[in-house]
């Protein structure tokens, strides 16, 4: 098990979380910390995890062919480091959430597509994942907490799902929702959080060629801790937009209020595009630490994806595009 110790750049959790919530969560987190410490001492854990999981029915789709189009300026983040440094508040509010995330049951898994569409539908993940060709893309990921990683995601462009859904011309936004199940996700028992986790995009963002629905990573089905079996990747936006374990995709004419915006709108908004020149109210966004290394790099406007997405925001300069 890889342990990542807190280094100078890592934000104490109280900086990334409103203080009253941080304090309220203390009792809960102390239990989690004990569990996490036990886990780090248990060499059999990874093995046990494999034995208890059912074989994933989509296993044959991976590794998918890598797209040549999306290249990295840094090495791919080590899989173990990436899989042991996560945000998945449904399970707990620390980075050490991989063990608790194993409680997520990813089959059967149904995605509801509804709202302003020609015909609402429900589709099982194994039908959905076989409707479109799966490809691998190397994407950078920039968390709002000033750390970053580089990941070989597999999946399909979100534009394909939009096409399948046949939205009405009056639909302006796509709203996505994560599962809600307190019996497996202890974080969801915390009523001061606005569950379920919600995120949203404009139709133009959802159909941009970079917008990717992730079903795999590192050459296999995506791990539970990264948001199996369906997760969003929008690499020019801060990491909290990358909603995990999606169960519902709705088309609407109202701008969706996302989980973090609902929780702390003074700090997190709808657009959340990466911009090194616009500081978070409590820390600078000028640079980022590559997790698993001691390297710090300057952060790039739109996380380096401006050629794909800058045009989406022409005429929207009055909006709060960078938070
Ligand atoms: N999706 C859900 N449902 N719950 C979460 O807590 N955290 C977000 C995002 N998606 C989160 C989520 C944040 S803040 C980040 S940075 C990324 O997931 C982290 O993805 P990773 O754990 O795979 O690195």
Image (tube, rainbow, N blue to C red):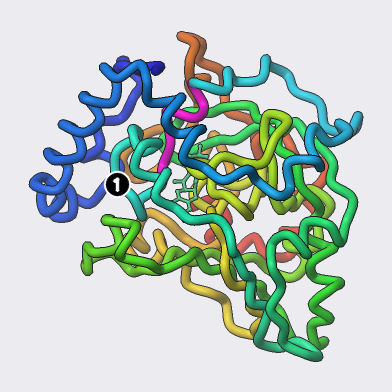
Report helix, strand or loop for mark 1.
loop
Q: Is residue 37 above or below residue 280?
A: above
Taking the image as shown, residue 89 lies to the left or right of residue 36, namely right
Residue at point 84% right, 52% down? 209
Taking the image as shown, residue 32 lies to the left or right of residue 178, namely left
Task: Choose top left, top right, bottom left or bottom right for residue 12.
Answer: top left
Task: Choose top left, top right, bottom left or bottom right for residue 35.
Answer: top left
User: Is there any visible trace of residue 118 in the rendered image?
Assistant: yes
Please state, as top left, top right, bottom left or bottom right, where the N terminus lies in the image: top left
Residue 59 placement (x, y as % from top left)? 73, 41
Which residue occupies the foreground of this view, 108 or 203?
Answer: 108
Magenta-drawn stretch contains 84: yes
Which residue in the protein does label 1 denote?
A: 92
Residue 25 placement (x, y as % from top left)? 15, 50
Q: Is residue 173 above or below residue 235?
A: below
Residue 83 placement (x, y as % from top left)? 49, 30
Residue at point 37% right, 67% down? 181
Q: Is residue 42 above or below residue 63?
A: above
Task: Choose top left, top right, bottom left or bottom right for residue 117.
Answer: bottom right
Taking the image as shown, residue 179 lies to the left or right of residue 206, namely left
Which residue occupies the foreground of this view, 158 or 11?
Answer: 158
Residue 294 placement (x, y as % from top left)? 46, 9
Q: Residue reaching furthest top?
A: 294
Q: Which residues are magenta?
A: 81-87
């Amino acid at each position: 098990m890889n342990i990542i110790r807190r280094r100078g750049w890592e934000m104490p959790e109280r900086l990334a979380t409103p203080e009253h919530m941080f304090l309220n969560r203390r009792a809960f987190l102390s239990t989690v910390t004990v569990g996490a410490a036990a886990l780090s001492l248990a060499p059999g854990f990874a093995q046990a995890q494999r034995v208890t999981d059912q074989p994933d029915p989509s296993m044959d789709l991976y590794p998918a062919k890598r797209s040549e189009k999306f290249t990295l300026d840094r090495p791919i983040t080590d899989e173990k480091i990436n899989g042991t440094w996560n945000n998945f508040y449904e399970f707990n509010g620390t980075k050490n959430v991989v063990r608790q995330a194993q409680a997520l049951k990813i089959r059967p898994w149904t995605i509801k597509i509804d709202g302003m569409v020609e015909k609402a539908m429900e589709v099982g993940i194994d039908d959905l994942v076989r409707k479109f060709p799966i490809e691998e893309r190397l994407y950078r990921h920039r968390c709002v907490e000033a750390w970053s990683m580089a990941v070989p995601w597999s999946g399909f462009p979100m534009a394909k799902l939009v096409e399948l859904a046949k939205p009405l011309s009056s639909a302006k936004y796509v709203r996505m929702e994560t599962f809600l199940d307190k019996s497996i996700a202890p974080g969801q028992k915390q009523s001061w959080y606005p569950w379920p986790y919600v995120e949203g995009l404009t139709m133009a963002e959802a159909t941009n060629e970079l917008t990717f629905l992730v079903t795999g990573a590192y050459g296999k089905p995506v791990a539970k801790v990264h948001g199996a079996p369906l997760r969003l990747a929008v690499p020019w936006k801060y990491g909290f937009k990358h909603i995990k374990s999606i169960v519902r995709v709705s088309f609407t004419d109202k701008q969706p209020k996302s989980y973090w915006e609902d929780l702390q709108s003074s700090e997190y908004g709808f657009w959340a595009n990466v911009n090194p020149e616009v500081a978070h109210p409590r820390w600078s966004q000028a640079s980022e630490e590559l997790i698993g290394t001691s390297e710090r790099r300057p952060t790039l406007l739109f996380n380096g994806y401006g050629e794909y997405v800058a045009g989406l925001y022409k005429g929207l300069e009055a909006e709060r595009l960078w938070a």
